[in-house]
Amino acid sequence: MKQRSFKEERKEMVEAQLISRGIKDPLVLNAFYKVPREKFVPSEQRDESYSDFPLPIGEEQTISQPYIVALMTEALRLKGEEKVLEIGTGSGYQAAIIAEIVKEVYSVERIAILAQRAKKILKELSYQNIKIKIGDGTKGWREFSPYDAIIVTAAAPKPPQSLIKQLAISGRLIVPVGNLYSQELILYEKRRGRLRTTNFGGCRFVPLKGEEGWK
Ligand code: SAM
């Protein structure tokens, strides 16, 4: 029999992995207390749902470590009214976290089977403010631009220009930038036509593949 409920594991994850490492934004922490991560994890991995590392989700892709999801979300300084674009839907977990905070989430995934699975889970969990599309997210999703914030959850050689173009004035883009083996999490902020950058430290993501990513 399972010794602790997923709810208990979730609470412990928030305290031991997020708060203890400096995640403070109450909107972000509330989202993490709420979203059932175990629903986004394949059944073979379910016991590890709240572990402090990324997990495989099939198709050589991963659901990111909870702390990295929290760090990237907090960096975007979301308040509640925003329209956010995510590139790399994967399991759909990051989209659900953001959807708990903001008005509208748009998410693009290049692997159809992952996009379809994520759509199904998010529907079962009754999220009505997330739209998912299958395609090359390095080109963004022009139809609903500009976005107040854009989050790229795969490693890019450089920030895709199409995404910078689709940012609203004062918009924020967070993206892991580097080579295929290690990257830095960089926040780009559009300020009076200029880009201000902040480095949130080292990380390791699966590659962003596409026209403005890795070939
Ligand atoms: N955000 C996801 C989650 O919460 O589970 C984790 C994303 S996983 C680390 C990276 C995802 O980016 C993979 O699902 C991969 O297929 C996707 N990806 C890579 N290049 C892409 C592109 N050009 N457009 C859209 N998705 C892409």
Image (cartoon, rainbow, N blue to C red):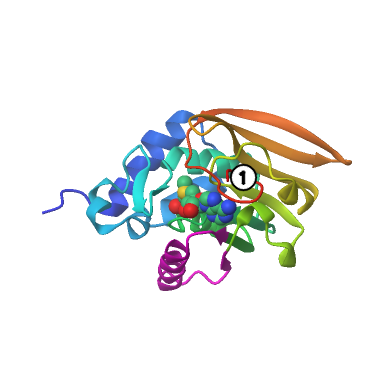
Give x and y (percent) for residue 114. 43, 61
Q: Is residue 119 located in the magenta-colored stretch of the structure? A: yes
Give the residue drawn at x 61%, y 62%: 106
- Is residue 121 placed above or below 151 in the rendered structure? below
Quadrant, the N terminus: bottom left
Give the residue drawn at x 37%, y 34%: 16
Asked whether residue 35 appears in the rendered view, the answer is yes
Lateral position of residue 198 relative to residue 165, left or right:
left
Give the residue drawn at x 31%, y 49%: 49
Q: Is residue 17 located in the magenta-colored stretch of the structure? A: no
**Regarding mark 1 in the picture, which secondary structure is present there?**
loop
- Is residue 165 placed above or below 108 in the rendered structure? above
Figure quadrant of residue 188: top right
Tell me where the magenta segment starts and ends, as one range: 108-134
Lateral position of residue 165 relative to residue 71, left or right:
right
Q: Is mark 1 within 8 Å of ligand 1?
A: yes
Lateral position of residue 72 relative to residue 205, left or right:
right
Residue named by callout 1: 213
